[in-house]
């Protein structure tokens, strides 16, 4: 989060009154949208106030009249992408609701590959972010009225989503760097994998290569999510019995 100035009057980005842009000056909304386009296409390392200003055909100094700097801009970007689509409506079925929320978060993280790493490094306190977190806690409350347990359930499910999507994005990025399609990559490593299997040194890995089904990313995500939800349900039941 952007560094606060000293003194009791220091305001968080969410508490600031935004200036009305001068004629022809980019609005805060345009600044944020331009920044998201850059981060989506080139990664967050390509993001700077100078770069956003150039893409908007504006002076860098004019952006600082409305956004204090890159950190504040990232906070606004995170809140903006959390408001792109309305969250799935709750049904009162905790499992169905948390599944929908997890799927929605996965879709958002895949649309914006930079988002996951930024969310792990800063609290998301904008209105859209808080609304989604409150929705997840409401869904978990249908499983347990204990807010501590409900918080633990939500944190566990979200941690799974972040981890699964991080792995999925890493595989996509590795594929892009290699310049090979998945089929071409498999063909290139095929002879080595056959040697490993035929060596007999790694019997369970060999079974995986020869016998296991190759799940698509969405299918693997759903399997892992179901396991997580089974686990938290058993944990909550155990806590209520204890």
Image (cartoon, rainbow, N blue to C red):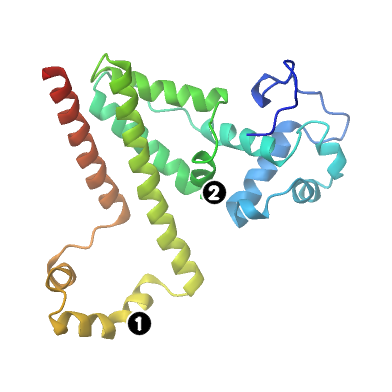
Is residue 75 visible to us here?
yes
222 lies left or right of 48: left
Q: Quadrant of the N terminus?
A: top right
User: Residue 11 appears at what percent x and percent y?
Assistant: 70, 21
Q: Is residue 14 shown above or below 195? A: above
User: Residue 82 appears at what percent x and percent y?
Assistant: 52, 33
Label 1 – label 2 distance at C-alpha: 30 Å
Q: Residues within 10 Å of mark 1 (few under 14, many from 20)?
A: few
Residue displayed at 12% across by 19% down: 242
Viewer-proximal residue among 165 and 97? 165
184 lies left or right of 29: left
Helix, strand or loop for disc 2:
loop
Q: Residues within 10 Å of mark 2 (few under 14, many from 20)?
A: many
Is residue 89 visible to us here?
no
Q: Quadrant of residue 78?
A: top right
Residue displayed at 15% across by 18% down: 240
Which dot marks residue 188?
1
80 lies left or right of 142: right
Q: Please identify the residue farthest to the front as the structure is shown.
A: 6
Helix, strand or loop for disc 1:
helix
Q: Earlier in the sequence, mark 1 or mark 2?
A: 2
Q: Are marks 1 and 2 in contact (CB under 8 Å)?
A: no
User: Residue 51 appears at what percent x and percent y?
Assistant: 76, 51
Residue displayed at 85% across by 35% down: 25
User: Residue 192 appears at what percent x and percent y?
Assistant: 28, 84
Task: Report which residue position mark 2 lands on.
Answer: 114
Viewer-proximal residue among 78 and 100? 78
């Amino acid at each position: 989060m952007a560094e606060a100035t000293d003194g009791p009057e220091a305001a968080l980005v969410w508490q600031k009154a935004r200036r009305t842009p001068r004629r022809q000056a980019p609005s805060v909304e345009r600044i944020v949208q331009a920044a998201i386009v850059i981060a989506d296409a080139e990664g967050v390392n390509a993001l700077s106030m100078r770069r956003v200003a150039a893409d908007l055909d504006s002076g860098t100094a004019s952006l600082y009249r409305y956004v204090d700097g890159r950190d504040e801009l990232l906070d606004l970007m995170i809140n903006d992408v959390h408001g792109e689509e309305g969250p799935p409506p709750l049904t009162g079925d905790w499992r169905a609701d948390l599944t929908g929320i997890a799927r929605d978060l996965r879709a958002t993280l895949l649309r914006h590959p930079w988002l996951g790493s930024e969310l792990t490094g800063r609290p998301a306190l904008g209105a859209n972010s808080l609304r989604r977190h409150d929705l997840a806690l409401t869904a978990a409350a249908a499983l347990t009225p204990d807010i501590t347990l409900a918080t633990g359930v939500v944190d566990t499910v979200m941690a799974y989503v972040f981890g699964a999507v991080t792995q999925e994005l890493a595989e996509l990025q590795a594929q892009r760097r290699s310049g090979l399609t998945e089929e071409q990559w498999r063909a290139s490593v095929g002879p080595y994998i056959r040697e490993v299997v035929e060596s007999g040194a790694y019997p369970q890995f060999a079974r995986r290569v020869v016998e296991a089904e190759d799940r698509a990313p969405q299918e693997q995500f759903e399997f892992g999510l179901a396991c997580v939800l089974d686990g938290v349900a058993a944990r909550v039941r155990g806590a209520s019995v204890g």
